[in-house]
């Protein structure tokens, strides 16, 4: 029997309201979860896998940008538009590019905050 291995290299944390994210060339973006290595974003407008991009993250009055690559993108649903037609909503996984020390500290601070929130909500194990 084949042994299953975890595919994640970094712990992912759900992103609460108050932490905003946007991806270049998309609209109505919402950051769903984030890790040290990447993020999951919900948005409108196509993001092409393999292309480089930049994610902007804002929280607590701070804002920083992280260069990234679009790892994958898929349509998850449609929403009605005012014009009567429908618009596609995508989930896109991005991988952060290494070698940008100016983004490491703000990302680490955000992950520390999200980890603490996640641990507060976890049931106590005995």
Image (spheres, grey):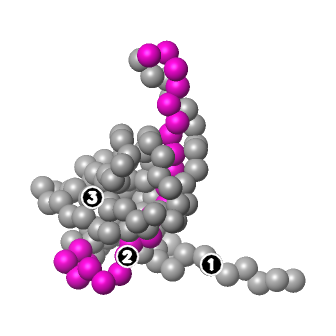
The local crowd at label 2, few if under 14, some if 14 to 19, many if 20 or more residues have their Cα within 10 Å, is: some
Instruction: Give the residue at x 32% y 60%.
Output: 55
**Element under label 1?**
loop
The local crowd at label 3, few if under 14, some if 14 to 19, many if 20 or more residues have their Cα within 10 Å, is: some
- Residue on which disc 1 sits: 6
Above or below: residue 81 compared with residue 64? above
Find residue 110 and report its horizontal and vertical position in percent: 27, 67
Find residue 8 and report its horizontal and vertical position in percent: 55, 75
Contact between marks 2 and 1 (CB within 8 A): the answer is no
Find residue 3 and report its horizontal and vertical position in percent: 77, 84
Q: Nearer the viewer, residue 107 or 13?
A: 107
User: Which region of the structure is painted magenta?
Assistant: 83-104
Above or below: residue 86 compared with residue 24? above
- Residue on which disc 2 sits: 97
Cα distance in 3D space between marks 2 and 1 = 21 Å
Cα distance in 3D space between marks 3 and 2 = 13 Å
């Amino acid at each position: 029997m084949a042994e299953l291995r975890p595919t994640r290299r970094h712990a992912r944390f759900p992103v609460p309201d108050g932490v905003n994210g946007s991806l270049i060339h998309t609209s109505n973006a919402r950051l769903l979860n984030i890790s040290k290595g990447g993020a999951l974003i919900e948005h409108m407008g196509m993001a092409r896998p393999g292309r480089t991009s930049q994610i902007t993250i804002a929280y607590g009055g701070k804002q920083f940008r992280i260069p990234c690559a679009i790892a994958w993108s898929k349509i998850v649903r449609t929403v009605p538009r005012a014009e009567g037609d429908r618009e596609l909503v995508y989930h896109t996984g991005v991988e952060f590019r290494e070698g940008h020390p100016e983004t490491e500290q703000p990302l680490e601070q955000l992950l520390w905050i999200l980890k603490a929130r996640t641990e507060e909500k976890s049931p106590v194990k005995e």
